[in-house]
Image (cartoon, grey):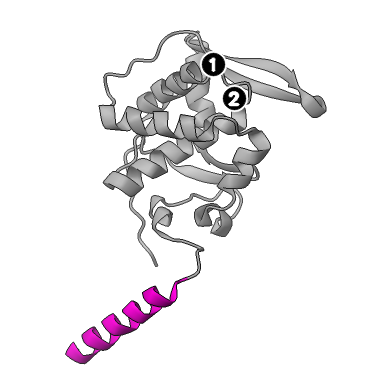
């Protein structure tokens, strides 16, 4: 059985990050429920890939529209109850309703490093112009989402896997390493 790395889920950091993402995405006409979840996902998984540690430590699960923080709903409920955030329902093309997260108070960023906020800003900028359908489709390319079952946790380590075909050069190098280290055994 594989042992996955687990992190202390930090609900307060998730709450403040929700507010930060909502505040930074106010002018994005495509910012809705699907997009905020993907921004949070890519921010945590990018931080893990680069630094070995996610920003919030939240567990992400597979849902039909892509990965989401397992505790998003209860954490958002606390923000709503404290009147720090709200949901605005906006009609969009095709008869759909966009569920926009609105920050009613500025986020408290003292628990974040400048590097963490830079990653979140990078993800927000990278996904600007993506509507819910497109951002969802992109997240479906992530192998962690592909192999997980509905509502199953997606381990952070999945960022190190790829579905890209191995190049001839990589294959030759792998064979060379196998031959070299196989002879030492």
On the image, the x and y values in percent for residue 94 come to 81, 29
**Pointer 1: what residue?**
26
Q: How many marks can you see?
A: 2
Whether label 1 touches label 2, CB < 8 Å = yes
Position of residue 6 measured from the top left corner of the image (x, y, whole percent): 34, 48
Disc sitting over residue 31 in the figure? 2
Residue 85 on image: x %, y %: 51, 13
Mark 1–mark 2 Cα distance, whole angstroms, equals 8 Å
Which residues fall within the magenta stretch? 166-185
Q: Is residue 183 left or right of residue 152?
A: left
Q: Residue furthest right?
A: 95
**Residue 6 vs residue 145, the one in the foreground:** 145
Q: Is residue 87 above or below residue 183?
A: above
Image quarter in which the N terminus is found: bottom left
Horizontal arrangement in the rendering, residue 44 relative to residue 37 (left or right) = left
Q: Earlier in the sequence, mark 1 or mark 2?
A: 1
Identify the residue shown where x is 47% and y is 39%.
41
Q: In the drawing, what numbered circle is on residue 120?
A: none
Res. 113 in view: no
**The residue tagged with tag 2: helix, strand or loop?**
loop
Q: Is residue 21 visible?
A: yes
Q: Would residue 149 be counted in the magenta stretch?
A: no
Q: Is residue 82 above or below residue 171?
A: above
Q: Main secondary structure of the magenta part?
A: helix
Instruction: Tell me: residue 174, above or below residue 144.
Output: below
Q: Position of residue 62 (x, y in %)?
A: 56, 47
Mark 2 nearby-residue class (10 Å; few <14, some 14–19, many ≥20): many
Question: Helix, strand, or loop for circle 1?
Answer: loop
Near-viewer residue (53 or 117): 117
């Amino acid at each position: 059985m594989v042992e996955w790395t687990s992190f202390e889920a930090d609900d307060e950091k998730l709450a403040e990050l929700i507010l930060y993402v909502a505040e930074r995405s106010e002018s994005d006409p495509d910012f809705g429920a699907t997009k905020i979840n993907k921004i949070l996902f890519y921010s945590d998984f990018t931080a893990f890939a680069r630094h070995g540690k996610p920003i919030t430590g939240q567990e992400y699960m597979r849902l039909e529209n892509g990965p989401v923080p397992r505790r998003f709903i209860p954490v958002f409920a606390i923000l709503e109850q404290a009147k720090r955030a709200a949901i605005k329902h906006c009609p969009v093309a095709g008869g759909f309703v966009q569920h926009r997260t609105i920050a009613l108070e500025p986020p408290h960023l003292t628990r974040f490093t400048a590097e963490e906020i830079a990653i979140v800003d990078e993800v927000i900028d990278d996904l600007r112009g993506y509507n819910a359908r497109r951002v969802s489709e992109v997240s479906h390319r992530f192998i962690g989402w592909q192999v997980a079952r509905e509502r199953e946790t997606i381990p952070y380590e999945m960022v190190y896997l790829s579905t890209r075909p191995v190049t001839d050069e990589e294959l030759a190098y792998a064979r060379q390493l196998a031959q070299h280290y196989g002879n030492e055994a």
